[in-house]
Image: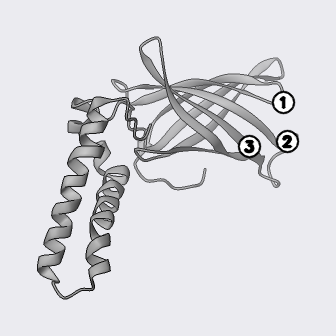
Amino acid sequence: MGVDFKKTSHIILFAGVMPLLSLLIAWLFSKILPSLPYWVDTLSPIYGYGLIYLLFDRYLWRCPIFTAFGIVSIPNLNRRWKGKQRSSYQENGKNVEVKGCLEIEQTFSSVLVRGYYEKSKSESVVCAFTKLNSEIYLFYAYDNDPNTLKCGTMQQHKGSGKIRYLPADNRIEGFYWNSIGNQGDMFFEYETTELRKRF
């Protein structure tokens, strides 16, 4: 996740192509507005590079061509997922199942996972994609805060999750464990690209 100068494709794009594009933008800028002070002209390649990188980081990285050339090797999970979690916690002798939504907010250089449930919400504090046994997983650590009006016996806690993307089914599944001694499975399907920030 992010720029890795150990990769040849990243060296070519970020140290070769983008600087050339930023110089071209600076040159065009100087032709359109030739009477600007010299210090603006000096800074314009830096601004140009920053603009190009910002566009790539926020939007362009999702284009399939960057995956084809090995520049992007992580899946695009930037959307809202709806499903359930099955917990090791039991009530009346049965494992509790909780409906919820995961919203993954992702750019080329960062990823954030938020969980929304009827009785609580969670937000990741650390997130990273990792390759294990030729598959890419999203690992994250989170803080969970109960809804004070509906939480019942639920308490504030910390936890971790591990997610695998199944592109053929457009769904994610995974496993979680938390600091209050529970663990369980997660099953979520694609709902929408809109991040609603609520249950």
In the rendered structure, the answer to whether residue 17 lies left or right of residue 160 reads: left
Please name whichever residue, 153 or 6, is drawn nearer the observer in this view of the structure. Answer: 6
Label annotation for residue 155: 2
For image coordinates 73% across by 33% down, the residue present is 159
In the rendered structure, the answer to whether residue 127 lies left or right of residue 35 reads: right
Separation of residues labelled 3 and 1 (CA atoms): 11 Å
Q: Extreme left residue here?
A: 31
Label annotation for residue 43: none
For image coordinates 24% across by 38% down, the residue present is 12
Q: Which amino acid does label 2 sit on?
A: Gln
Please name whichever residue, 108 or 120, is drawn nearer the observer in this view of the structure. Answer: 108
Residue that label 1 marks: 180
Residue that label 3 marks: 144
For image coordinates 20% across by 37% down, the residue present is 65
Separation of residues labelled 2 and 1 (CA atoms): 8 Å
Answer whether labels 3 and 1 touch (C-beta < 8 Å).
Answer: no
Which quadrant holds residue 42? Answer: bottom left
Q: Counting other residues with Cα less than 10 Å from the Cα at mark 1, is it few (<14), some (14-19), or many (20 or more)?
A: few
Considering the numbered disc 2 on the image, is that residue within a helix, a strand or a loop?
A: loop
Answer whether labels 2 and 1 touch (C-beta < 8 Å).
Answer: yes
Q: Is residue 105 above or below residue 130?
A: below
Sooner in the amino-acid sequence: mark 3 or mark 1: 3
